[in-house]
Amino acid sequence: MISRIRTDLALEAKELWRESADETTKLSGVEAYDETRGSFKISTVKILDEEGERQLGKPRGTYITIELDGLIRREENAFEDAANILAEELRKILKLEENASVLVVGLGNDAITPDAVGPETVDCVMVTRHLKQHMPLEFAAFRRVSAIQSGVLGTTGIESADIISAVCQRLSPDCVVAVDALASRRMDRLCRTIQIADTGIVPGSGVGNSRMALNSETLGIPVVAVGVPTVVDAATLTIDMAQRAGVSLESSRFGDDGTMIVTPRDIDRCVKDISKLIGYGLNLALHNGLTIPDIDMFLS
């Protein structure tokens, strides 16, 4: 089941395993639990060993998924609440020392809207490395944060991992936060879910165009991935909808049509909204004592 349905979300990989397994079968090597804060559900999946990796098809590590139903319903203070929850979860997984520096990387292609989450997020990140260098007293309370948009191989001729590795060698950050678009198995999770993972990321995997991995093995420092599903491939969507209707389908029957990518019709607004949320969540997580109005003023 997992092999024929594409998803980048560990939460969905666990769902797929459960759907394909006998009710009495235990999911070995995986710890999972859910909690609710206000209108937001937070699901944590921890892949503990090789057996867990094999069962879910994901690297060993911690995956935190925040479902943004309250924000989608435009509830009062939903943006601020969501940003603060995202910041709390980021702090848990980043585990930064007080003086640690961070490089935020926006992966993806800003000319293709469903792939523009990374670049759009970078536009909402407070970069402070240069300010701390030139005005250390005035910005003493801020962490050193730098940010880049790595572009894509087709427009730069350079692998994103090579660009980021070169920047890391020059700046020596203590951690990289990589933001990218992902693929989901369901339309109702697109731009409504944020996944944080301490396993790094493989750029382009969401659309089946995987590039060189960005993780602690390739960069030599911790890499935290923040991802948002913006697309579903046609075969995955069709299989999922058919299963919900009680019909069994095989992806091999779709031919080339199954490789099409599906995205919401209001993807432009969705990407801008959720990119702003990620950027603000990162700012709150990386700089102590900030508020949403503080970030608005800094970025204006």
Image (cartoon, rainbow, N blue to C red):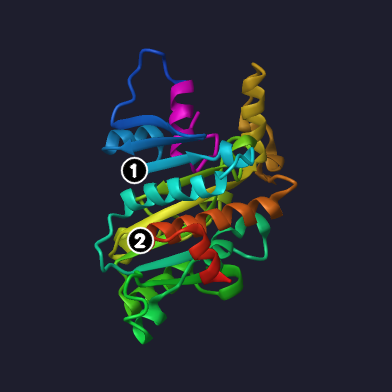
**Label 2: how many Cα within 10 Å (few below 14, some 14–19, many 20+):** few
Q: Which residue is disc 1 drawn over?
A: 62
Give the residue furthest to the bottom.
134
Instruction: Give whichever of 88, 209 is nearer the camera.
Output: 88
Quarter of the image for residue 33 reads: top left
Image location of residue 271, percent across then percent down: 63, 54
Question: In the orientation shown, which residue stands out farthest toward the right?
Answer: 265
Residue 113, image quadrant: bottom right
* Nearer the observer, 82 or 109: 82
Residue at the image position 32 percent from the left and 82 percent from the top: 136
- Residue that extends furthest to the top in the rendered view of this protein: 24
Question: For the residues carrying marks 1 and 2, which lies nearer the camera in this image?
Answer: 2
- Using the image, tell me which numbered label, if any, was put on residue 288: 2
Stretch in magenta: 1-19
Tell me, for residue 124, which label it has, or none.
none
Of mark 1 and mark 2, the one earlier in the sequence is 1
Residue 290 coordinates in the image, percent (x, y): 42, 61
- Dividing the image into 4 quarters, which one contains the C terminus? bottom right
Task: Please tell me which residue is depicted at 57% across the width and 37% down the height of the picture.
Answer: 70
106 relative to 251 in the view: left or right: left
Label 1 residue SS: strand
Q: Residue at x 39, y 57 (%)?
A: 285
Q: Is residue 210 visible?
A: no
**Type of the residue with mark 2:** Asn
Residue 299 higher or lower than 255, as above or below: below
Q: What is the x, y in percent for residue 265?
A: 75, 46
257 falls in the magenta region: no
State yes or no: residue 8 in magenta.
yes
Camera-nearest residue between 161 and 248: 161
Residue 97 vertical placement versus 48 (above, below): below
What kind of element bears circle 2? loop
- Give the residue type that dot 1 points to: Thr
